[in-house]
Image (cartoon, rainbow, N blue to C red):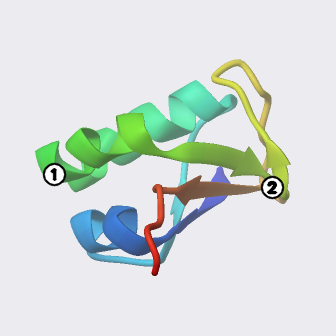
C-alpha cells in the first residue's frame, strides 16, 4: 500500500486529497485508484504527472508502504 496524494482537478475528481491504495508499482496503484474513484478520475489521469517521493515516476516504478505517489494535473496561472 502506498499513500496517494491528489492535487487540483485530480483531487476534485476523486473527492479526496489523500488515500492509501494497494499496489506494488505506480501502474498498479493508479489502476486501483481508477477503480476506486471512477470515470471522472480516469479522465483526468492521462494529463497528470506522477511523482514518487518527490521524483518523476514511470508506470513500472516500484512502490512500498512508506512511499508517496503524487498525482499532479497541469496547472494554469496568470
Instruction: Give the residue at x 63% y 58%.
Output: 70
* Residue 32 visible, this angle: no
**Looking at this view, is 54 or 36 the one in front?**
54
Q: What is the quadrant of residue 8 in the picture?
A: bottom left
Q: Secondary structure at mark 1?
A: helix
**How many marks are shown on the rendered structure?**
2
Query: Residue 31: x, y in percent?
Result: 41, 32
Q: Is residue 18 above or below residue 13?
A: below
Instruction: Give the residue at x 53% y 29%.
Output: 28
Numbered tag placed on residue 40 in the rendering: 1
Numbered tag placed on residue 67 in the rendering: 2
- Neighbor class of circle 1 (other Cα within 10 Å; few <14, some 14-19, many 20+) is some
**Marks 1,2: beta carbons within 8 A:** no
Query: Residue 78: x, y in percent?
Result: 46, 81
Q: What is the quadrant of residue 22 in the picture?
A: top right
Q: CA distance from mark 1 to mark 2?
A: 25 Å
- Neighbor class of circle 2 (other Cα within 10 Å; few <14, some 14-19, many 20+) is some
Query: Residue 15: x, y in percent?
Result: 26, 75
Instruction: Give the residue at x 54% y 39%.
Output: 29
Instruction: Give the residue at x 55% y 58%.
Output: 72
Amino acid at each position: 500500500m502506498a499513500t496517494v496524494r491528489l492535487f487540483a482537478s485530480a483531487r476534485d475528481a476523486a473527492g479526496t486529497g489523500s488515500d492509501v491504495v494497494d499496489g506494488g508499482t505506480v501502474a498498479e496503484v493508479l489502476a486501483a485508484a481508477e477503480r476506486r474513484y471512477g470515470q471522472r478520475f480516469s479522465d483526468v489521469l492521462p494529463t497528470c504527472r506522477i511523482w514518487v517521493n518527490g521524483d518523476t515516476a514511470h508506470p513500472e516504478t516500484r512502490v512500498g508502504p512508506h512511499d508517496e505517489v503524487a498525482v499532479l494535473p497541469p496547472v494554469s496561472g496568470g
